[in-house]
Image: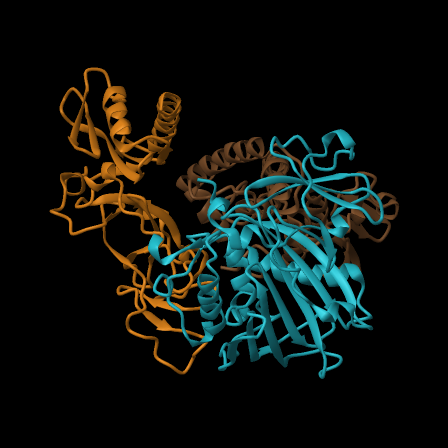
Amino acid sequence: MIRLYDYPMSGNCYKVRPLAAFLGIELALIPVDFYPGRAHRDAAFLAINPLGQIPVLEDGDLRLRDAQAILVYLAAKYDGTRTWYPSHPETMGKIGMWLAFAERITATASAARLHDAMQYDFDIERCRAEAHAALQILDEHLWFAEAGGAAWIATNDHPTIADIACFPYIMLSEEGGISREDYPAIRRWTDRVKGIKGFITMPGIFPR
Amino acid sequence: MNATARDPVICNDWHPVAGCIDLPIGRVHSTVLLDTPIAVARRDEQTYLVWLDPEHRCRHHMPLDAAIIGPTLPATLRYGHLWTSIDEPRHPLFSLPEADEAGRRPCHPGSIGVHTGGLRAIENFLDLAHFPFVHTGILGAEPYTEVLDYTVTINDANEVVATECRFVQPQAALNATGAAEIHYIYRVPRPYTAILYKTCPLQPERFDVIALFVQPVTETRCIAHQWICILDSSSSEAALRQFQLTIFGQDKPILENHREKRLPLDPRAEMPVRADATSSAYRRWLAGLGVRYGTISASQQ
Amino acid sequence: MNDRVSMHPALAAYRHRWIVIARTADVPAGHLFHGRLLGEELAVWRNNAGHINVWENRCPHRGVRLTIGSHLGDQLQCRYHGWRYATGSGGCVHIPAHPNETPPARIGVKVFRALERSGFIWASTEEPSSEPASIAHLPADHHPLRSAIMRAPAEVVAAALLRHAFAPAGGTAQRIDPLTVVVRHATGQETLRWLIQPSTVDTSIVYGVHAATVGGAWLEAAQQLNASLQSLRSTIEAQT
């Protein structure tokens, strides 16, 4: 079975779980005591991922770190219809762009959450300001996507891994003191993500 | 006005400021208690320090150095946490005899910062009716939504106690094997401390102990320190922690979406029903103690 | 009540007005829209028949935002304890903790007056004096623009919109009421209309309506106007 080194409160680990659910992939979850145990910094885990980050995915002999890389792999390998990661070059380019944007959301909104919820020493005002700047960009993108008839970040009719990658830390933003009140297009899009058949939640994110 | 200046009840009480697990020897833990920046450190296995850090000079996790230690505050290690007071504690720390019982397993699932007032976090901990909607499939599930009548009293030690609480739970604990009617007793020894005694899936005649110690950071921010002392000897530490953190993680967005982060003490401010008997008694008890920090009193309505 | 701070005097002037609080498209079926009006937080949703509800965003039980709840078609359910409120009246119809009892009639969500016209949702905190011109005379063929949230009082935003104008060469801008600016061609034909929502004392939302241009060019025009509006927002926010 495919193994996922997982922590239930991590938005990055969570990214993998709904995609696996949409694709009908069963995951064996291996709990990593990120907080308070700091097990991701233990020698045993550093041997699995020298960056000391979760999630990590193991499929046979393949070991992958980084949530975005894992999404790319699972969608490319296990989605026979290739709707979650279409092989169309332009769409692949767009998805790559928004996967990098998801990393930006992690670096800002997730950092703010770690500061507020788990006492990490970050520059909180800067994290929040940069998260708002990123949300502003996404809201504008989604507004014009909608106006042009597209429901999803990188595609018109079917969600992709770009939507999954951007979703968790946006939904968890309030835990870092970042309100989504000013981003109506983002709020409509998060509703659409929650409406995907087979959607699953994590602690901190309610179903629709 | 500094919100603490008007509340001797809370200022003279003991408050948790860190779980032991978050205090590696020789490192500073920087935090805030009652709007007051403080620093905490473990000097060696036995010695814990808490001091005022008004200029916020201590960064989180910086090495402990005698030069950075300011005026010290009282420090007591108990129930897996370090406790302090920003004034003169008028009472000893509340008692929790189960902590010393043989065969129990203490565990600190973690301390989580929340964008809400600490009294909201305590009140939520005392609440049964939200289980099917917030902890769906674990602590509750529709159609089992009914809260049967239970008894709320104030005991001889002037603590709020709710007994005969019952609820049908799909997975009451990590080691539960199926749905069961679970029996609860709640005890609120201090305004920011609540303890739950819950049917143990393995030994129905004994109770697991689950405690919530809340550190009031400001009137609208808190750190929720969980501590459990249970009879489960087979589950791993990591699995126990993740179960508790999952439950708390589900409560968090509710707590952070109260329009008013402080707790209103006027019974007309928020509409209670019979199922809220513990919460109503808790609010009355807080008003009777004269607690102001983190509350909206009737006169402020 | 605890969180019902009395209305700021600068906002009280708008109490009896119909004020735009969202575009029609901001509240699709099944969505719980988080809005704001004169400092009041709103939960805006439509029932299965499409009827618009503009409610205070607060469950009367424990004060939790209703916008994190569930849309049940003709009822809105609070996420915390599952209390359900009926479309239209806002009255509480079900308390799951006491499933066999009828909820007391006094329990209900605060409901605001609302109407939906010309692609916008309008609300009023108190009895509105009339339907303002800004609702009645919207150009028949128009497209809504992307709204812009500005950290500035409505008065400042209205004055800046009037000054900045976005008017075509030879065109004019006119403030037809305190919260509406109309931009016209030299010919007198309306090209743009700005509707201002005073959400709080120091935050305003600007909604634009663009008279339709020939063919499919409106999206391009909307993008240009969005860029201009965002740049105006930076200028205004830098000054306040």
Identify which residue, A42 or A82, lies in the foreground: A42
Identify which residue, C191 or C240, lies in the foreground: C240
Vertical relation: A99 (above or below) B166: above
The residue lying at 58 percent from left, 43 percent from top is: A166
Image quadrant where residue C1 sits: bottom left
Vertical relation: C239 (above or below) B121: above
Task: Specify the farthest residue to the left.
Answer: C130
In this rendering, would B204 be left or right of A181?
A: right
Colour chosen for chain A: brown
Image quadrant where residue B1 sits: top left
In this rendering, would C115 be left or right of B75?
A: left
Q: Position of residue B4 (x, y in %)?
A: 50, 46
Q: Position of residue B16 (x, y in %)?
A: 65, 53
Q: Which chain is cyan?
A: B
Image quadrant where residue A97 sits: top right
In this rendering, would B93 be left or right of C28?
A: right
Colour chosen for chain C: orange
Q: How is the image coloured?
A: by chain
Q: Position of residue A33 (x, y in %)?
A: 76, 53
Task: Specify the farthest residue to the top.
Answer: C170
Q: Can you see residue A199? A: no
